Image (spheres, rainbow, N blue to C red):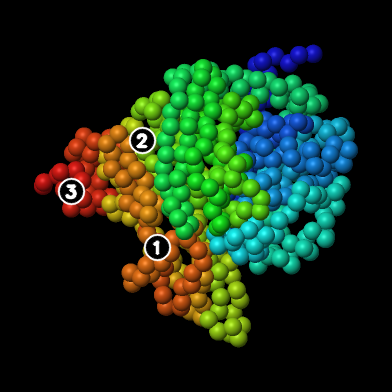
Amino acid sequence: MTTSPIDLQIMWNRLIAVVEEQATTLIRTAFSTSVREAGDLSAGLFDRQGRMMAQAVTGTPGHVNAMAESVTHFARQIGQQNIFEGDVFITNDPWLGTGHLHDITVVSPTFRNGVHIGYFACTAHVVDIGGRGFGPDGNEVYEEGLLIPIMKFAERGQVSDILISIVRANVREPDQVVGDFYSLAACNEAGDRRLQSMMGEFGIDNLDELSDFIMETSRIATRKAIAKVPSGTYTHDMQVDGYDAPVQMVVELTVDGDQLKADFNGTSGMSRFGVNVPEVYTRAYACYGLKCAIAPNVPNNTGSLEPFEITAPEGCILEAKRPAPVSVRHVLGHLVPDVVLGALHKALPNTVPAEGASALWNIQISARPTDPNSGLKNAEVLMFNSGGTGARPAVDGLSATAFPSGVSTMSVEATEHVGPITVWRKDFRQGSGGAGKYRGGLGQTIEIEPREGYDFYFNATFDRVENAARGRDGGQAGEAGSVELADGTKLKSKGRQIIKNGQRLKLSLPGGGGYGDPDARSEEQLTSDIENGFISREQAQSDYGITS
């Protein structure tokens, strides 16, 4: 019996609720602040072929779109003959998962009436995975932490004690990390319970017909959207900081009817430091940027992602090969949408935003007692922070907002609770948004100090310090970022450094680029900007020509 398209659409909508509950379970049970506070996770349902049917809105594009590929690797390597009810699979392999060792991907097969019908999968960033810690200083992936190959976390419901013992012996925060492993497994189990209830309600025993409907409907809708983009070849390039040398990111966007290809030929080669990006992560964010602009209303799944062909030349920094260091692959990966949107702007004017801060200003803090014999404990603290987004064609950019990653900023209270640090300041950075008819979003200023009895090391993973976010169509660039002590002493924007007790780390996060001629900004908007402290009167005079 063939199910009607209306019933299939209703079931499709219900799947979104299923995977949202899956993600919510992970947030509520997670140990790491990066998951429960910032939402650095993904969750989704996949069919027996490993095709993503639905993803939770909660989560990041880098996780979701990379995970859309990774489940097929699990299915192939585990093998159908070795998949049993109660199994839970796991990996953090950067090239088979989501790009670096700190992301744990967990996949759980789902069964109905004893028959395997699909998979639930989820990913989360854990606070530590050993090695050098979450930073860019490694020269090979082997230095960056413990790599867990695709394997079983649990078989027929029995958790692998050997795996747990190995993990606990190799990470700095074993309770948090192992706790998150269990949270990931629980997240998939919650999704399965909700799915079973839905399937019983609709009287179906497998997902095959529904999955085919989702894939074909999404594929057709996406291709129709691509066909509305004028055919042609559009190029764009952008220089970013890199680690020890600037990196050129280059893309050629080719549109031919309903076919679209983005090729990163011309992009700089791999770095010897951990800013390299596995191609799976490059594809994830390139697809995200393009899909946001071209087909934003089509649900995200394998069918809607397939029409975007993303390639990068082997050995370039956006197609890093083993055993390249990739720990902070997000730094360049989050800048990929700015590059592809710059090319798309030439095909679709007045559609995409100006460049933004884009890359998260994540900071990993390793707090250590000043006196090793004091009896005080070590602690690992992870903070996610965001600069400003680029202004859009008809509205200002967003301040201190993560785009394209989509994670939330952790609260100061939650961050201070997990480690001996004090966040003295966290406010908008006046004047950091690029001038334009529409102003770029503001960055923020953050000051952090170790508490009494502690120093801390921090891993700087910051970009847009040497190369600010550029404006569009006459808009000015946003302010570049800076890393320093509160007394003005300059620090490096990448790499491990120490903050001694009594010193204060000051981060000035970059602002987004402006959009359009600053002279066209309304007097009402400028007055509001000045009154709210977004720009100074001096900046109003210098950037906008205001004389009173």
Q: Which residue is mark 2?
A: 392
- Please report whichever mark, 1 or 2, sits nearer to the chain's N-terminal start: 2
In the rendered structure, the answer to whether residue 22 lies left or right of residue 109 reads: left
| Residue that appears at 45% across and 45% down | 248
* Residue at 60%, 55% in the rendered image: 325
Q: Residues within 10 Å of mark 1 (few under 14, many from 20)?
A: many
Q: Secondary structure at mark 3?
A: helix
* x then y, percent, for residue 116: 83, 33
Residue 192 location (% of width, % of height): 75, 38
Q: Residue at image x 67%, y 33%?
A: 52
List the residue tagged with mark 3.
Answer: 542
Circle nearer the N terminus (3, 1): 1
- Checking the image for residue 73, the label placed there is none
Q: Residue furthest bottom?
A: 373
Query: Residue under circle 1?
Result: 483
Nearer-the-camera pick, 443 or 180 = 443
The Cα–Cα distance between marks 3 and 1, rounded to whole angstroms, is 25 Å
Q: How far apart are the two marked residues, 2 and 3, measured between alpha carbons?
A: 22 Å
Q: Amino acid at mark 3?
A: Ser
Residue 90 visible in the current orientation? yes
Q: Residue at x 54, y 28 (%)?
A: 261
Q: Position of residue 85 (x, y in %)?
A: 85, 41
